[in-house]
Image (cartoon, rainbow, N blue to C red):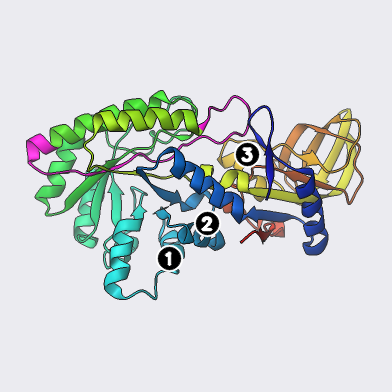
Amino acid sequence: MKKERADDGVFHISAERKDLLQQLASDEGTPIFVIDHEKIRQNYQEFRSYMPTIQVYYAVKANSNPAIVKTLFDMGCSFDVASLPEFMIVHEYIRDMPDEERLDWIWDKIIYANTIKPIETLQVLDQYKPLVTFDNREELRKIQQHAPNAGLVLRLRVPNTGSMVELSSKFGADPGEAVDLIAEAFERDLVVEGLSFHVGSQCNNFDNYIQALQLSANIISEAETRLDRKIRILDIGGGFPVRYHPRVKSLKTLAKKLNTEIKRLFPPDMQILAEPGRFLVANACTLVSKVIGKAFRDGKPSYYINDGVYHTYSGQVFDHNTYPVLAFSEGEPQISAVFGPTCDSFDTITLSALLPDLAIGDLVYSENIGAYSIASSTYFNGFPPAKVVHINR
């Protein structure tokens, strides 16, 4: 979907695309979740252009729609999966390969980046021999018993200061025990291929990356000296920022810092992986919904629409993000409340939308809503998720 970059650097939908969205809503009904595959391809190419030496592993959890996976697969992308169902979505596109070719592809193109895995999942993964992450001894024992053929990547705990969603309270080995964990893995006849870290989702503090890279370089150097083993994979995770608002720094600025530090700290044969999710899909998707009710509450107009926080707006709860509700129609803006359709007062999208006077049946939309949104939709109260509509496939 064509978008225009405003002076603030944030992508907004063009007038032409607003017309298309309204036509799609008329044809398909509402709510609809519109995925623009051309924008996904552009985002992938932009990421690669800024950091050409870094291998891109799409974080499938950001939006696991199989058509998105197929678009990125066709671009030559690799994949970060965090569950067996996500693994199988990717596997769907390679299942017809000869066994040897398929196993080589999985080894090179998939990392199972959830440090905690059910035994049943490990037993399935073992036949495919992918890279898997770990961050504690109990997980190491499980892997030894149920997936000894996997390649291991130790996830480190690193600073998450300034990120929209912090992850280090739940994941990552303390740096002080990292080399001991690597040593124990080798003692168990497992192979540690690399290290990984994640600076937190939507990271706007680029020092997090710099500190994590330095920490990783130190641990790799100590491990190689002490254990006489080469470690040649470093997964720098995700967190790459999206311009939801003007205060967000650009990927180009971050890329310059990363390229410089990686070149300074690591040998040329180090394989650097990254796990962008949000960056690849956030601004490629738009939600269109319809006003199904209207009231005047607490001194302002209140609109009820047929999507809400149990559905596509779930990112406002789980992703700590906001998606402004915008109108297609013109008019004097008023501070307005917008609620979802369910019988739960928690289903409140915003109490401060700037909207013109709307009537029942009018359409509204939200931009840049492609990441961690529809992926968490439920059927709460009997309302289904928005219908997915694809363009530019």
What's the CA distance linking mark 2 and mark 3? 18 Å
**Residue 296 vertical placement versus 211 (above, below):** below
Q: Residues within 10 Å of mark 3 (few under 14, many from 20)?
A: some
What's the CA distance linking mark 3 and mark 1? 28 Å
Check disc 1 and report the residue beneath it: 88
Q: Nearer the viewer, residue 322 or 145?
A: 322
Between discs 3 and 1, the one toward the N terminus: 1
Question: Residue 97 in the image: x percent, y percent?
Answer: 36, 74
**Residue under the image location 52 percent in, 42 percent down:** 279
What's the amino acid at mark 1?
Met
What's the amino acid at mark 3?
Gln
User: Image quarter for residue 30?
Assistant: bottom right
What's the CA distance linking mark 2 and mark 1? 11 Å
- Label 2 secondary element: loop
Question: Residue 297 in the image: x percent, y percent?
Answer: 87, 33
Contact (CB < 8 A) between labels 2 and 1?
no
- Label 3 secondary element: helix
Q: Is residue 88 visible?
A: yes
**Residue under the image location 64 percent in, 49 percent down:** 285
Magenta segment main secondary structure: loop
**Residue 82 vertical placement versus 155 (above, below):** below
**Residue under the image location 66 percent in, 27 percent down:** 8
Q: Is residue 372 visible?
A: no
**Range drawn in magenta:** 224-250
Question: Residue 18 in the image: x percent, y percent?
Answer: 78, 47
Q: Residues within 10 Å of mark 2 (few under 14, many from 20)?
A: many
What's the amino acid at mark 2?
Ser
Between discs 2 and 3, the one toward the N terminus: 2
